[in-house]
Image (cartoon, rainbow, N blue to C red):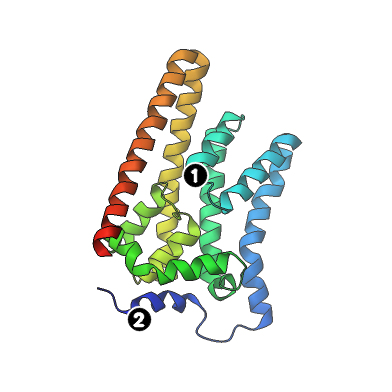
Amino acid sequence: MRTPSFRIAALELAPSRPVHIPERVIRIILPFAIGLCYYIPLLAFIPYEQWLILGGLMLAYIFPPAGKESVIPIGIAVGFPWWLMAFTTILMDILTGLFMALNFDIALKIPGLGRWIRKFIANGEQFFARRPWLERFSFAGVVMFVMFPLQGSGGIGATLVGRMIGLSPARVLLAIAIGTTIGCTAIALGAEFVKELILANPALGLAVAVLIIGTLAVIYLVYRRKMLARDSLSG
């Protein structure tokens, strides 16, 4: 059983020294500036309508319940190349992780997000009891957490998980980068394969799509059932 100090350890993401206004401005702006430096130039390479759609998908990805398992296939379905959707989602995970690493104390004050973070930390014991592999594999555990489309497995959730098991901010960001690259690339390639199959043979393609969705739904339901069973036992 964990001690309360374990849960409080996540709050150490907050700067241990006072952050002056110029540095704070840089900390806040940097992730958004990198994102804009990526997004704005895309207007020169894709049509304006698609550019707006991509921006909408990027914003949707930040807020639950949208995740890589939904945003990437939707983007590919409306005509974006698989590699563009994969890279865009990878970048979003890394930038949200970077924002958390630099501005955890500010994130705690953001309406909605701050409440979610505090609840996440307060339920740390239960969260890790349901996912013992995270602590067991440490760095690799965070990589796997980001790799698979689990609830809260984006940059924000992964940052909290990584810091709560004792990883440094740099190692957390590295784990996020590795995990999201593998996961997003796999999902994008899979979605592209299904799309091409539907275009070549609609009946077969739809059958494969239904089979994949059904399989994932069963896996999710089994996983959720196991989580609920563990909660009842621990309760």
Seen in the picture, residue 190 relative to 171 is either above or below; the reply is above
Which residue is painted at 58% across and 36% down in the image? 75
**Tag of residue 5:** 2
Report x, y in % for residue 179: 40, 51
Find the residue positioned furthest to the bottom: 18
Can residue 187 be seen?
A: yes
Residue 189 image position (x, y, % from top left): 45, 33
Q: Earlier in the sequence, mark 2 or mark 1?
A: 2
- Alpha carbon of mark 2 to alpha carbon of mark 1: how far? 33 Å
Q: In the displayed structure, does residue 144 sit left or right of residue 73?
A: left
Q: Nearer the viewer, mark 2 or mark 1?
A: 2
Tag 1 residue: 68
Q: Secondary structure at mark 2?
A: helix
Say which residue appears at 61% left-offset and 29% top-offset. Answer: 79
Return the residue nearer the eye: 35 or 137. Answer: 137
Answer few, some or many: residues within 10 Å of disc 1's Cα (few below 14, many 20 plus, some between 14 and 19): many
- Judged left or right of residue 3, residue 105 is right
- Residue 229 is marked as none
Residue lying farthest to the right in this orientation: 48
Sort mark 2 into few (<14), some (14-19) or many (20+) by Cα contacts within 10 Å: few
Q: Quadrant of residue 176?
A: bottom left
Residues 148 and 28: in front is: 148
Which residue sits at x=49%, y=44%? Answer: 68
Residue 64 against residue 211 in the figure, above or below: below
Q: Label 2 is placed on what type of residue?
A: Ser
Task: Specify the quadrant that holds the C terminus.
Answer: bottom left
Residue 58 image position (x, y, % from top left): 61, 47
The kind of secondary structure element at disc 1 is helix
Which image quarter: residue 25? bottom right
Type of amino acid at the residue the image marks with label 1: Lys
> Quick check: marks 2 and 1 in contact, CB under 8 Å?
no
